[in-house]
């Protein structure tokens, strides 16, 4: 093969800064350069993969039948163990998700938190839980504000004082009260 051995570190180059003599490259030119670089890296990766396959074939050719059978069993056991771990992880995520759904979390929130917990990413889990708590707090506050009776602000037809407070008022205070709240004054003086 006449191809040159290219390692990924040789391929990576820092972008050139344009000088006064060299104009800045257009997006199409930069895209073309990146595509060429990608093709080189892909070719090198494919070459490495094919060499690895060749070495594997050579190694297996040197093995005896018993060694070959043992190698195949070990590979099958490794695949089985990997599948088992994947299934256990999915089951754990599902169980954790059910717990959070029972606590009132939305399905997507419960799923994200379950994945974070199963992966041991407690920082992400804490951030997700804080976002959920903020969402729930806003919903509770909005619900509370809807059901809350109208607060008396001192204006309108409502009386700013109770009957007991009215009884304790001086004559001048009662005159002011009568001009501001005539209906309430009539109700208190009956």
Image (cartoon, grey):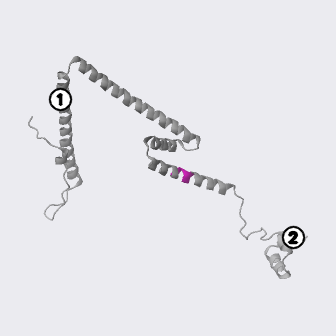
Q: Is-magenta flag for residue 8?
A: no
Q: Can you give x and y, in whole percent of width and height, for residue 123 in the image?
A: 45, 50
Residue 160 x %, y %: 77, 71
Question: Farthest residue toward the left?
Answer: 2
According to the picture, the residue beneath numbered tag 1 turns out to be 55
Q: Residue at x 14, y 61 (%)?
A: 22
In which quadrant of the rendered view does residue 116 lie?
Answer: top left
* 85 relative to 182 in the view: left or right: left
Tell me residue 119's x, y (percent).
43, 41
Disc number lying in front (1 or 2): 1
* Magenta span of residues: 131-135
Q: Is residue 58 above or below residue 38?
A: above
Measured as percent of width and height from the top left, residue 174 is found at 84, 78
Q: Within 10 angstroms of label 1, few (less than 14), some, or many (20 or more) residues?
A: few
Quarter of the image for the C terminus: give it: bottom right
Q: Residue at x 15, y 43 (%)?
A: 6
Sequence-wise, the earlier of marks 1 and 2 is 1
Magenta stretch secondary structure, dominant: helix
Give neighbour class at mark 2: few <14, some 14-19, many 20+ (Cα, 10 Å).
few
In screen coordinates, is 86 left or right of 37? right
Q: Residue at x 31, y 25 (%)?
A: 74
Q: Secondary structure at mark 1?
A: helix
Q: Is residue 163 above or below residue 90?
A: below
Task: Quadrant for residue 48, please give it.
Answer: top left
- Circle 2 residue: 188
Compute the Cα span from label 1 to label 2.
104 Å
């Amino acid at each position: 093969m006449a191809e040159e051995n290219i390692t990924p570190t040789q391929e990576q180059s820092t972008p050139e800064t344009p000088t006064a003599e060299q104009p800045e490259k257009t997006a199409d030119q930069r895209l073309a350069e990146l595509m060429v670089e990608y093709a080189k890296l892909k070719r090198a990766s494919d070459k490495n993969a094919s060499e690895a396959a060749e070495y594997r074939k050579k190694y297996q050719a040197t093995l005896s039948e018993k060694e070959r059978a043992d190698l195949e069993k070990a590979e099958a056991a490794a695949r089985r163990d990997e599948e088992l771990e994947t299934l256990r992880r999915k089951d754990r995520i599902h169980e954790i998700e059910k717990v959070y759904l029972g606590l009132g979390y939305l399905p997507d929130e419960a799923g994200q938190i379950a994945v974070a917990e199963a992966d041991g990413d407690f920082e992400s889990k804490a951030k997700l839980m804080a976002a959920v708590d903020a969402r729930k707090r806003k919903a509770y506050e909005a619900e509370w504000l809807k059901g809350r009776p109208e607060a008396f602000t001192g204006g309108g037809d409502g009386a700013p004082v109770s009957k007991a407070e009215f009884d304790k008022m001086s004559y001048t205070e009662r005159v002011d009260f009568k001009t501001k709240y005539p209906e309430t004054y009539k109700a208190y003086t009956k």
